[in-house]
Amino acid sequence: MKNTINRFLTLGVLFLVISCDKNFDEINTNVVDPTSDSVDPIFLLNNAIVNTSFSNAQIIFDMGVVQQVISPNSGVLTGANYNQDNRDVTDDHWVKYYENVIKNTGDIIGQLQAEDAPDRPNLLHMTRLIQALTFMILTDEYGDIPYFEAGKGVTEQIVLPRYDSQEAIYADLIKEVREASAGLSESAPAEKGEVLYSGDIGKWKRFGYSLLLRLGMRLSEVDPSLAEQTVAEAFGGGLMQSNEDNYAIRHDSNYTNNAGSLLNSTEANNFYMVDTFVEFLRDTNDPRLMSLALRFTGATSGPEQVIETGSKDPAEQVGMPLGYDNGTIGTVVDDLGLASFYDFTQIDRFRVAKQTAPIYVLTYSQTQLLLAEAAVRGWVTGNPEDYYNQGVTAHMQLMAEYDEEVAIADVDIQTYLADNPFDAGNAIEQINNQYWVSCFLNGPEAFANFRRSGFPDLDSNPYPAQDIGTPFINRLTYPNSEVATNNENLSAAVSRMGPDNLETKVWWDQ
């Protein structure tokens, strides 16, 4: 009996082994791994594109440094409001972009290059552009970063990438964007499944050359010769022609705007437009103030900030000054005769910063304003005034895309330009002041251009207990996770660049 049982057990095991062996390849093939051949890499590209939207560090740091939006509160909101380091926030851009963009673009490029990508050159070049845009934001925010070895955890098993100098990064970014923009071809297979331009190669090329223009202009003070050469090449390649070419991340109820989610949930009552920004718009009768701003006149608490009681009248807007916390802001409230700090002007979070609002990463307006400066410098042909007027007009027209209720009429745009004409004698400052406005809700670009150009001419934050001895924050600090796990490479960057604090300047800002 015992022998009979053993024979049955042996046959059963043998049957299982044969069955498992028969299906071994199928069972052990990962059909959900996004790096496997079973998944079209266009989906990885789409994931990368939608994640180029900005993290909440833009609200807490970037937009605070350039004095557009501020909070009097501390804790998780500590940042540019007090000019204090808060590494729970400064790592937001880093984590979001490396984990959700660079990982995906690195996987795509590795996969396509391994296959030589003979049949999908446009996908490769699109991916290179998205990667270059993201690396530009990262290096502008932090300085020296992992670049040449980044995004190669899967393809080359590099888990602790070295940091590269920003100067070397910029040189390669220019090369990458130049080659990718030129390489995009109408004759190659279309990539209509991508979510940015639905495979429109003309728009992709104009985005690529507009990104090249941005790269070139960033070097205007540190390497004017390379800047001029790069700008001229971008101009010759063909730039964005209208708001239809904008690099915009669209949102809906399922995929929401990060800033909109923050400003309409836990922090709905805690961020306010800075008086510097409000007064700049009001002093020139800029119709964008009515579009962007909303004040809950007389509000004494968050629950009283409801859309029905909000005023959009420019004459009633009161921006919040810098340098106060939630303990000292009360003196300002009393001096201004306000009901409470809830009475200051906010971004219109029900329209412009709603959760379904688009995010504009690179726009026709910004491109035209950079062209205006380039024309003033003699780097491109054309009339600086024309570029300037087109840049201002395009941003005002963009308000309608946030919400029809905040659209600006053409007659109001023309009135503004007539009342505030281009001033050739003060062109660089005027252009960059408008660039500041055009970058509203694009914190990384506003922060970068402020450091590059020195405009607008802002007074520094007077908060008494700061972590900086410089007039302004110059960069964001590295994540604690990098300090803990990649310290050897990080330390090499710090020894080259300067201390890992908010004061150290990035290479192009020397």
Image (cartoon, rainbow, N blue to C red):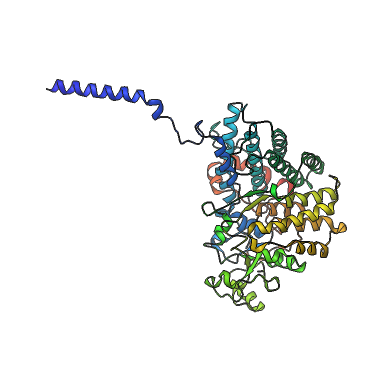
Choose between 70 and 463: the one closer to the eye. 70
| Of residues 380 and 72, the one drawn nearer to the viewer in this rendering | 380
Classify residue 146 as left or right of residue 375: left
One can see residue 327 in this view: no
Spot occupied by residue 239 in the image (x, y as percentages of width and height): 75, 44
| Residue 208 percent location from the top left of the image | 70, 41
Q: In terms of image quadrants, where is residue 1?
A: top left
Given residues 188 and 217, the one toward you in this image is 188
Residue 410: % across, % down: 75, 61
Q: Is residue 275 above or below residue 40?
A: below
Residue 264 lies left or right of residue 2; in this view the side is: right
- Please state the total of marks drawn on the protein image: 0
Looking at the image, can residue 221 be seen? yes
Residue 100, by quadrant, is: top right
Is the residue 424 above or below the residue 167 in the image? below
Answer above or below: position of 186 versus 137: above
As drawn, the residue found furthest toward the right would be 425
The answer to which of 219 and 485 lies nearer the viewer is: 219
Residue 446: x %, y % from top left? 70, 54
User: In the picture provided, is 204 more to the left or to the right than 380?
Assistant: left
**Residue depicted at x 61% and y 62%:** 351
